[in-house]
Amino acid sequence: MDQREEIQIMKQPYDSTYYEKLNRFNLIGNNAYRERQRLQTIERLCLPGPADDFLELGCGSGHYTRWLADGVRKIVGVDFSEAAIEKARSLGMRDNMQYAVADICSLNLFRDHSFDKIIAIDVMEHLSDEQLAGALSEVDRLLRAYGVFVLFTPSRTHWIERLKHRNILLRQTVGHIGVRTEEEYRRIVERQGLKIKEVIRYETCIPLLRMIEGKIKDISLAGKFFVSRLGIAVTPINFSRKGPSRRA
């Protein structure tokens, strides 16, 4: 199966109905507590500023693209789903916002070193290892000197993800074909000539359980079973080959 066929199969669950439901809150799976974790990841690891040019990979209906728009110079959201981009555009545009239908593993519509910051929120778990490597290769190409790529994703070491992985009591979320451990991300990132600069480890968003997990997730050895989400900042290893920053 070539990459084009693989993408067509991946697109099937991501229709207009999927994007109508995306970002809706519920009690335990996607609540305000989880949303605060996502926003904290962007704010703490990206440090968005008014001179920054941003790219959002897998922007979906544009929730974080719109959230960032007021605080940055320019932001572009890309998604392989035409339904996603149509929905994002329908929810409002601003002068410094753009959307494009594009495969995040092949972003030829952008020149090298076009962005200061790149984000992917709840996206990497939808990619195979091969696709992840392709996306990271594009991240490396598109980042300017001293730029950063920030992702937010489930951690496969968490006890709930372990049950899903083994199909015990719980089923894996539709489309989550690449839920990984922190160690797996480190290996893949390093193979692509990048490095992980910082990691934030988050507890579950489930009420009550999050209070317990929040106290024990940083304990060595046992703690990884209670890390529900990872916020990861990735940077190039070799800044010099990228040339000077746009703001230098």
Image (cartoon, rainbow, N blue to C red):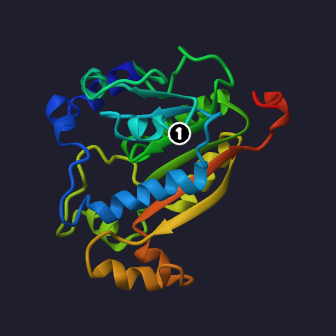
Q: How many marks?
A: 1
Q: Quadrant of the C terminus?
A: top right
- Taking depth in this image into account, of 152 and 12 the one nearest to the observer is 152
In the rendered image, residue 53, in percent from the top left (x then y), is placed at: 60, 30
Report whether 130 appears left or right of 242. left
Q: Residue at x 30, y 28 (%)?
A: 88
Q: Residue at x 28, y 43 (%)?
A: 175
Q: Which residue is mark 1?
A: 71
Report whether 212 appears left or right of 41. left
Q: Residue furthest left?
A: 17
In the rendered image, residue 223, in percent from the top left (x then y), is placed at: 49, 80
Report whether 86 appears left or right of 232. left
Q: Residue furthest right?
A: 240
Q: Is residue 180 visible?
A: no
Compared to residue 123, the image places residue 104 above or below, namely above
The quarter of the displayed image where residue 48 is located: top right
Q: Amino acid at mark 1?
A: Gly
In the rendered image, residue 132, in percent from the top left (x then y), is placed at: 50, 39
Q: Residue at x 44, y 54 (%)?
A: 39
Label 1 SS: loop
In the rendered image, residue 50, in percent from the top left (x then y), is placed at: 61, 37
Compared to residue 149, the image places residue 246 above or below, namely above
Q: Residue at x 49, y 36 (%)?
A: 130
Compared to residue 130, the image places residue 9 above or below, namely above
- Taking depth in this image into account, of 48 and 214 the one nearest to the observer is 48
Q: Quadrant of the N terminus?
A: top left
The quarter of the displayed image where residue 212 is located: bottom left
- Taking depth in this image into account, of 181 and 78 the one nearest to the observer is 78
Q: Residues within 10 Å of mark 1 (few under 14, many from 20)?
A: some
Q: Is residue 128 visible?
A: yes
